[in-house]
């Protein structure tokens, strides 16, 4: 299936699909070119494009196929047609495909203000809010938040690549009774010194201790409730410490997001949802007769939709998580007039999200239908190797450690990346030269690998495995980085071929004769569709798979299509050009996944 109307200016292969559609439509009136176009699929194994004839409902497929085959004329783009049962298969003409795809990758990467190969403008003029990560300050940033961060970061990049205006938002869990509890505990267990050192960890320790107390003594809980009430009432003496906690937590998180290559346009939080919006929502729901008053608590009955009864306001008048989300959504709509708003939140909160979407729908906000919950399953087994509670920085540190060990074991592999003649101190990792530079890079590499494992399966619950993460073989982040580094090193190693002439003056005939080159270049041509499909499925896994396929294709081409040592300079130049284009596309795919591609290791 074609993914959108043809646009050869952003996807060179569209011109090939269109050529097929024109010819098939001409043979099969009254089918229109557009009808046929939407039925031109990528083929399986070794086939460029395929049409499944039964979809057109034109009668006996053999007769229909024979008609098309008899009338089909090849042209500069389409070289052959074959009939196989219910299918028609088509092959592109290598020389044209190779030239058009490489020229497009080159032009849209280098000859425009912003590299944009793979992008499209299907979202032009539309605004999307993507809320992700949203950890709770003073509580651990657990692996679920890491997944939300990575999936959300991916979606933000993706929507931008499709022309949307994206507002990325971090909605901190910075409000609620638990802050009354921490405040109570802080009086007993808190230390400003510890707080300065590591706010999140210290507050978590306090929380754990006071939580224990509260379980043993109901008075501790009651005290926490009273404290939170004072916070809600805006009592400055109750808010003072809380402000410091929030600020220190945000500071710490920002540093970690930077390491993950993740950014937010807006840091907001539950504490920042305007009270007036929550009040207005309650009044409106009451007017609509949707609220039950149970001993002073306000409850909305959603049993009709199998969503239970949801509390919107407690007896003591304090707000809760659900009310803040309802008020927050209204407030965001007023401010941004979004066309779509996405919440990336673990599937453990499915009920919560469906309740608050339902309430907004019952309130008859027309935009309620443009809210979307993107959920994901649990990650099992991802704790530090020693303990169980996982903070983001522990995960990062631990991953760095694992990688460090791995690199020491893999000297040989590393030596292969840079030509030994070019090796300079600090240029690559080696056990004795533990430069900062090297360290930083190592961290990026390994973060790439965490990300990949993490995001490739959005819904499935999967079990995290440290051993898999550190592998340079198989489908891991380091494998992709390794491919990118090798591609990037080619021009450094072949200065005699530089600068490459402009695309029109590179002779690509030799590439057309190689099945390896053809496979790589056709894959490059499919990248704009990979982006479109990802937008449809809102899944990063297709992009991960694509990057893997491309890297596999390159690794089987290295030997056959060498650049260094190739005496025919025309050939060597064409290959170098192909590898440079491949590096650009692999780099774009990695960046879409929030991974910073490495040039060197
Ligand atoms: N802070 C919440 C948690 O860690 C996640 C927030 C999700 N977003 C929302 N709008 N409710 O569980």
Image (cartoon, helix red, strand yellow):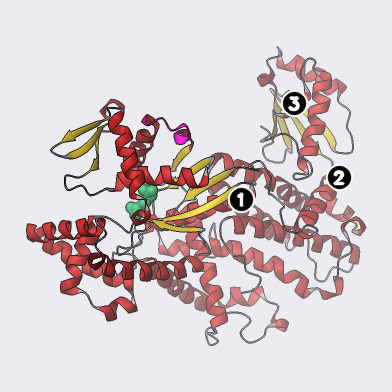
Q: Nearer the viewer, mark 1 or mark 2?
A: 1
* C-alpha gap between disc 1 and disc 2: 31 Å
Question: Residue 380, percent across and down?
Answer: 34, 54
* C-alpha gap between disc 3 and disc 2: 23 Å
Residue located farthest toward the top when viewing the structure as drawn: 59
- Asked if residue 213 lies in the magenta stretch, the reply is no
Q: Is residue 293 left or right of residue 550?
A: left
Answer above or below: position of 265 versus 16: below
Is residue 460 visible from the viewing direction of this image? Answer: no
Query: Badge 1: how crowded within 10 Å, few (<14), some, or many (20+)?
Result: many
**Secondary structure found at label 3:** helix
- Residue pictured at 82% horizontal, 23% vertical: 69
Q: Nearer the viewer, mark 1 or mark 3?
A: 1
The magenta region covers 363-368
**Mark nearer the N terminus (1 vs 2):** 2
Question: Residue 513, percent across and down?
Answer: 85, 51
Residue marked by disc 3: 34
Query: Badge 2: how crowded within 10 Å, few (<14), some, or many (20+)?
Result: some
Q: Is residue 131 left or right of residue 551?
A: left
Residue located farthest toward the right when viewing the structure as drawn: 505
Residue marked by disc 1: 160
**Secondary structure found at label 1:** helix
Are the residues tagged 3 and 2 within 8 Å (C-beta)?
no
Question: Residue 216, percent across and down?
Answer: 8, 60
Residue marked by disc 2: 96
- Residue pictured at 80% horizontal, 37% vertical: 16
Nearer the observer, 152 or 320:
320
Answer above or below: position of 374 versus 154: above
Question: Residue 10, percent across and down?
Answer: 75, 45
Nearer the observer, 83 or 76:
76
- Asked if residue 365 lies in the magenta stretch, the reply is yes
Is residue 452 visible from the viewing direction of this image? Answer: yes
């Amino acid at each position: 299936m074609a993914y959108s109307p043809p646009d050869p200016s952003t996807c060179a292969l569209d011109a090939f699909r269109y050529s097929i559609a024109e010819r098939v439509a001409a043979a099969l009136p009254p089918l229109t070119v557009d009808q046929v176009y939407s039925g031109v699929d990528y083929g399986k194994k070794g086939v460029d494009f395929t049409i499944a004839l039964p979809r057109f409902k034109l009668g006996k497929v053999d007769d229909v196929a024979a008609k098309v085959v008899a009338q089909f004329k090849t042209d500069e783009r389409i070289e052959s047609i074959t009939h196989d049962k219910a299918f028609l298969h088509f092959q592109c003409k290598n020389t044209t495909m190779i030239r058009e795809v490489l020229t497009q990758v080159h032009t849209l990467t280098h000859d425009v203000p912003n590299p944009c190969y793979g992008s499209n403008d299907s979202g032009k003029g539309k605004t999307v809010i993507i809320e992700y990560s949203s950890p709770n300050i003073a509580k651990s940033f657990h692996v679920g938040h890491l997944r939300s961060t990575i999936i959300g970061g991916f979606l933000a990049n993706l929507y931008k690549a499709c022309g949307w205006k994206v507002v990325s938002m971090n909605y901190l869990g910075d409000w609620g009774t638990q802050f009354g509890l921490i405040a109570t505990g802080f009086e007993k267990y808190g230390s400003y010194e510890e707080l300065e050192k590591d706010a999140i960890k210290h507050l978590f320790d306090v929380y754990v201790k006071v939580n224990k107390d509260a379980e043993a003594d109901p008075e501790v809980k009651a005290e926490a409730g009273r404290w939170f009430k004072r916070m809600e009432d805006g009592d400055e003496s109750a808010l003072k410490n809380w402000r410091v906690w929030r600020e220190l937590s945000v500071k710490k998180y920002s540093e970690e997001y930077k390491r993950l290559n993740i950014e937010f346009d807006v840091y907001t939080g539950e504490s920042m949802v305007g009270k007036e919006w929550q009040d207005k929502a309650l009044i409106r729901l009451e007017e609509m007769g949707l609220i039950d008053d149970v001993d002073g608590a306000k409850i909305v009955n959603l049993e009709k939709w199998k969503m239970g009864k949801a509390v919107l306001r407690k007896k003591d008048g304090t707000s809760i998580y659900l009310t803040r989300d309802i008020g927050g959504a209204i407030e965001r709509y007023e401010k941004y007039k979004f066309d779509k708003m996405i919440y990336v939140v673990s599937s453990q909160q499915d009920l919560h999200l469906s309740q608050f979407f339902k309430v907004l729908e019952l309130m008859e906000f027309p935009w309620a239908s443009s809210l979307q919950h993107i959920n994901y399953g649990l990650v099992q087994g991802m704790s530090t190797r020693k303990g169980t509670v996982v903070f983001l920085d522990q995960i990062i540190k631990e991953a760095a450690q694992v990688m460090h060990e791995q690199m020491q074991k893999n000297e040989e592999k590393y030596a292969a990346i840079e030509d030994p003649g070019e090796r300079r101190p600090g240029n690559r990792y080696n056990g004795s030269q533990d430069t900062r530079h090297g360290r930083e890079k190592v961290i990026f590499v390994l973060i790439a690998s965490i990300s990949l494992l993490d995001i490739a399966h959005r819904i499935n619950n999967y079990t995290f495995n440290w051993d898999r993460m550190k592998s340079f073989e198989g489908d891991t982040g380091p494998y992709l980085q390794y491919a990118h580094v090798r591609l990037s090193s080619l021009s450094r190693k072949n200065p005699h071929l530089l600068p490459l002439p402009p695309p029109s003056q590179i002779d690509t005939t030799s590439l057309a004769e190689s099945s390896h080159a053809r496979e790589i270049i056709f894959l490059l041509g499919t990248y704009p569709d990979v982006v479109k499909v990802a937008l449809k499925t809102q899944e990063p896994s297709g992009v991960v798979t694509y990057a893997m396929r491309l890297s596999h294709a390159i690794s089987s081409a290295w030997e056959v299509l060498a650049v260094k040592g190739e005496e025919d300079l025309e050939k060597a130049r064409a290959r170098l050009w192909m590898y440079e284009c491949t590096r650009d596309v692999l780099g774009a795919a990695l960046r879409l996944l929030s991974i910073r591609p490495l040039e060197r290791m």
